[in-house]
Image (cartoon, rainbow, N blue to C red):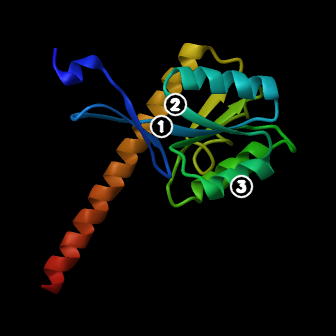
């Protein structure tokens, strides 16, 4: 058995994520989620579930706390309850998340889903309706993160193609 067959983990901390290395060829970056809900039981339960599935989760129990965390951290995803201090406090959190330069995926968590498409498009990429089973939660979060990563890669390719075109025209 080689040295790397021992499955030794080394953890490195960066400003935006924790990186786990188990071999010179395997690097796993924990995906960071900001979870916002004023119901402490829901907040702690969802945090535990997501951490069991290898996510790094920070929590906020109010919009004010969420705004502060958004400014001081970098997240791959922001999940916010809809109704907290106001009927649409969660939408305010998601709007603030979408303004961040790091462009996190966003999901609205609610027991009271809005009628029609009111919630989608400009404010949230996904709607998570409570109660939500563990498997459904993890599956939906994973799918949203994949969609977001694909979208960011597509935007980078478009930006690179435009930049190359501009260089050719200038040269």
- Disc 1 is placed on an element classified as strand
Disc 1 marks which residue?
31
First of labels 3, 2 by sequence position: 2
Find out whether the residues at labels 2 and 1 contact each other: C-beta distance under 8 Å: yes
Disc 3 marks which residue?
68
Q: Quadrant of residue 1?
A: top left
Q: Quadrant of residue 87?
A: top right
First of labels 3, 1 by sequence position: 1
- Disc 2 is placed on an element classified as strand
Find out whether the residues at labels 3 and 1 contact each other: C-beta distance under 8 Å: no
Dot 1 crowding, Cα within 10 Å, few <14, some 14–19, many 20+: some
| Residue 91 horizontal/vertical position (percent) | 72, 46
Dot 3 crowding, Cα within 10 Å, few <14, some 14–19, many 20+: few
First of labels 2, 1 by sequence position: 1
Asked if residue 17 lies left or right of residue 118, the reply is left
Up/down of 131 relative to 57, above or below: above
Disc 2 marks which residue?
55
Asked if residue 41 lies left or right of residue 144, the reply is right
Label 3, label 1: how many angstroms apart (C-alpha)? 19 Å
């Amino acid at each position: 058995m080689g040295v790397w067959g021992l499955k030794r983990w080394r953890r490195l901390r960066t400003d935006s994520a924790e990186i786990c290395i188990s071999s010179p060829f395997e690097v796993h970056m924990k995906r960071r989620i900001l979870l916002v809900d004023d119901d402490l039981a829901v907040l702690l339960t969802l945090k535990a579930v997501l951490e069991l599935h290898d996510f790094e989760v920070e929590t906020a129990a109010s919009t004010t706390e969420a705004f502060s965390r958004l400014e001081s951290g970098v997240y791959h995803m922001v999940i916010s309850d809809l109704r907290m201090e106001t009927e649409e406090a969660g939408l305010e959190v998601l709007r603030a998340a979408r303004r961040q330069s790091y462009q996190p995926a966003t999901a609205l968590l609610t027991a009271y889903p809005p009628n029609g498409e009111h919630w989608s498009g400009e404010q949230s990429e996904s709607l998570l309706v409570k109660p939500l089973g563990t498997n459904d939660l993890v599956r939906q979060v994973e799918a949203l993160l994949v969609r977001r990563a694909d979208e960011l890669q597509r935007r980078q390719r478009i930006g690179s193609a435009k930049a190359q075109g501009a260089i050719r025209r200038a040269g």
